[in-house]
Amino acid sequence: MSRSRFYLCVTLLFLGGFIFSVSNAFSQSSELGSISGEITHPIMRRYMGAVFIDEIDGIQFNADENQPVMDQVNLRFTPHVLPVLQGSTVQFPNSDEIRHHVYTSTSSVCQFELGVYEAGIVKEQKCDTPGLITLLCNVHAEMKGFIVVSPTPHFSTTDRNGSFRIEAVPEGTYTLHFEHERLMVDPITVHVIPDQETEVDFGKPRRRKP
């Protein structure tokens, strides 16, 4: 099995275990709903983003033992956008045949530098601050990836149409955020009703300043 396939399997196991743990945490309650919406902008067809629920007063979520993976394959960060729970330790394997040098932009909410490392090496970094992290490679200027750190396990990425859906959300009123490499919107308030899908509208997105 190739390294890229191995880390893809690890990522799928992480997501499967994470979804199971979140679902299990609320298995005693039927008061769950969902949130859906669409970010309307031509850029969304090329670059996905992530939506997440902000911190909930009085509730702290622990990161899952299965570590999320941001791989490096064919001179690309894979996946391009990786949402993770605050406090997660992210793995950064190098599945290419050449060395990489991963670091973050100065605008990132969590800044770090993993240094230069060879093919087959895996490095790790804990992400403690909610928001957008921009990943770069000091060896390959064309490489760029993003980690979106969420304070809750209620998050989702957008599809090619800008649509998103967050499942299994307990009843309540929350603040919803959208993070994207090129677009910005203001956070909105959403009220989740049991056994219903709540549709939201972030309004017209603005271009993020370079």
Image (tube, rainbow, N blue to C red):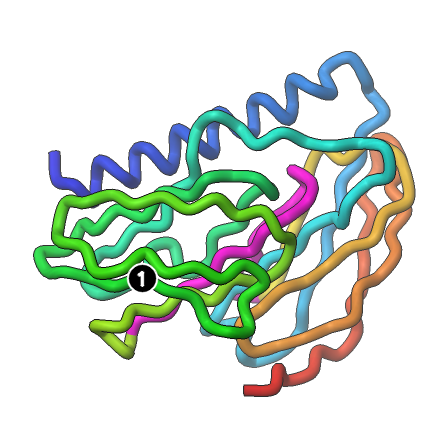
Disc 1 marks which amino acid? Val
Along the horizontal axis of the image, is 66 left or right of 197?
A: left
How far across and how far down the image is residue 199, in percent?
81, 54
Instruction: Place residue 117 in its image quadrant.
Output: bottom left
Membership of 91 in magenta stretch? no
Crowd tier of the residue under label 1, counting other residues whose Cα lies within 10 Å: few below 14, some 14–19, many 20 or above = many
Q: Give the range drawn in magenta.
A: 143-161
Kindly state the secondary structure of the residue where label 1 is placed. strand
Membership of 151 in magenta stretch? yes
Which residue is rendered at x = 56% and y = 22% of the image?
A: 20
Q: Name the residue under label 1.
A: 102
How far across and how far down the image is residue 185, in percent?
73, 73
Which of these two is toward me, 41 or 140? 140
Instruction: Place residue 28 in its image quadrant.
Output: top right
Which residue is rendered at x = 29% and y = 69% of the image?
A: 137
- Please say if 74 is above or below 4: below
